[in-house]
Amino acid sequence: MKSKKHTELSRTHQVLLVDDDPSLLRLLSLRLTAIGLTVETASSGEQAVSLVPQFKPHLVVTDLRMGGMDGMALFQHLQQHYPLLPVIILTAHGTIQEAVNATRQGLFGFLTKPFDSKALIAQVEQALQMGGWPQADSEQSAQQDWRSEIITRSQSMEQLLQEVKRVAQGDASLFIHGESGTGKELIARAVHRVGPRCNKAFVAVNCSAIPAELLESELFGHVRGAFSGAVSAREGLFQTAHGGTLFLDEIGDMPPLFQVKLLRALQEQRVRPVGANQDIVVDVRVISASHHDLDALVADGSFRQDLYYRLNVVTLTLPPLSDRREDIPLLANYFLTQLAPRYGDRVKGFSAESLDALVQYDWPGNVRQLQNVIEQLTALSTTPIIPVKQVEKALKEKRALVPGFQEAREQFEREYLMELLRRVSGNVSQAAKLAKRNRTEFYKLLKRHHLEPSRFKQDSASD
């Protein structure tokens, strides 16, 4: 009868085992798979946190003493984010009191090492009968899925997510400010998912990636024959997002001429496709984002003040990765898990020294750069555990420091302007003609990049 009970439990139940001792992890895995349960393993608390949203365990069994995020910290994280998920802690005799205290906080149970197999299986069966994740799928998961892409245990990020949940319930325009690579689109998607428009479309567009002459057609659409190449009518992204959310990323790079048209569309909730004679009513919530300081752009005249106020009803500010270093191990292990289908399971994790090196690095490219580095490490690693020397090498190499698209564009723009000024010895009129821009616009570009024409006159004289 007991084996039949195991079989009934095993059909749908999954257990996540967490321990930094490979031999104990292997032993636990063998004992639980022997009764038919589906088992996944993690060698650290950080890796376990990244696995939970994908694996969706019905039970977590974790060691108490581990490097980095220990069993108690893991339990507290799971209790906060998945309160219905039962957790069993394995503890040595010297730490029983900690486990006893944890049971008062909601821990399902604990086992002292060395433990008896029958006692382990009995406690696992009791925990699985609680049905932790099936309930979470219908109740808790529905509440937590909106933030499932955001991997964090940082207090500043948790406060930000609480703000996200609050502002999502309204319909005010929202502006997200943060450095390149901090995850502005992920926050925008979270706002959409937890808000009342979650069942409608979420449409994202990068304003800096679309040529100025095509931006109006891309957002508002066009009719057939509106311009050369318009062989058929096309719906704009405002219409595609009707009823849902439109995310305008890098809004600070939007051309001044189009800013007027966007302001009108937001005020009147109507758009007019290029070449059309009539407006189309649209209902969208607009979320915008930029790594630029929009106040500075308004001050120098390159961004309209009235549009700024229309977009910036509520502001959310994303911290750089260097201000949330406690998230770096979590993110590193999460990316490692995400890369497993592409590179196989040959890379299992990081050495403690490797994680320390990742945590100490400044990450000018933020989370996006960290993701690129983890992929490089995964692709090149010849050992299951990534050593610190490989991490240090990756952080020193230029490819680990490749800037984002917008950073590269700004760098090119600045170098281009400097070259023009050198050629004409700082003469702004001549430089503007070479760039095919009027003097006013050219001066704004120089101001944005903090370039003084007079300095290039001096440079020329010294040559």
Image (cartoon, rainbow, N blue to C red):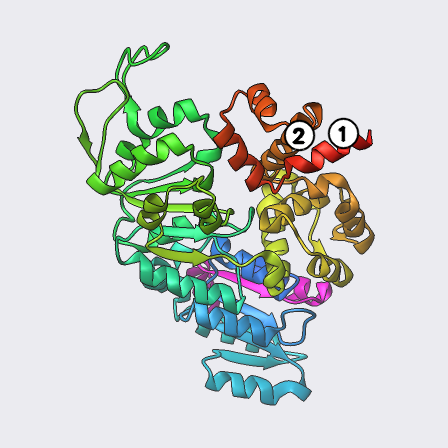
Q: Secondary structure at mark 1?
A: helix
Give the percent coordinates (x, y) of residue 48.
57, 61
Q: How many C-alpha atoms fall within 10 Å of the one at disc 2: few (<14), some, or many (≥20)?
A: many
On the picture, is 120 further left or further right than 217?
right
Q: What is the span of residues highlighted in magenta in the rendered image?
A: 1-28
Residue 12 belongs to the span the image colors magenta: yes
Which percent across, then down, holds residue 275?
Answer: 25, 18
Where is residue 254 shown, x and y percent of the image?
43, 35
Q: Is residue 67 above or below residue 373?
A: below
Residue 12 in sight from this viewpoint: no
As measured in the structure, the alpha-carbon distance from the residue carrying label 2 to the one carrying label 1 is: 8 Å
Quadrant including the N terminus:
bottom left
In depth, the one of 93 and 386 nearer the eye is: 386
Along the horizontal axis of the image, is 315 left or right of 95? left
Amino acid at circle 1: Ser
**Relative depth, front residue between 67 and 461:** 461
Residue 376 visible from this viewpoint: yes
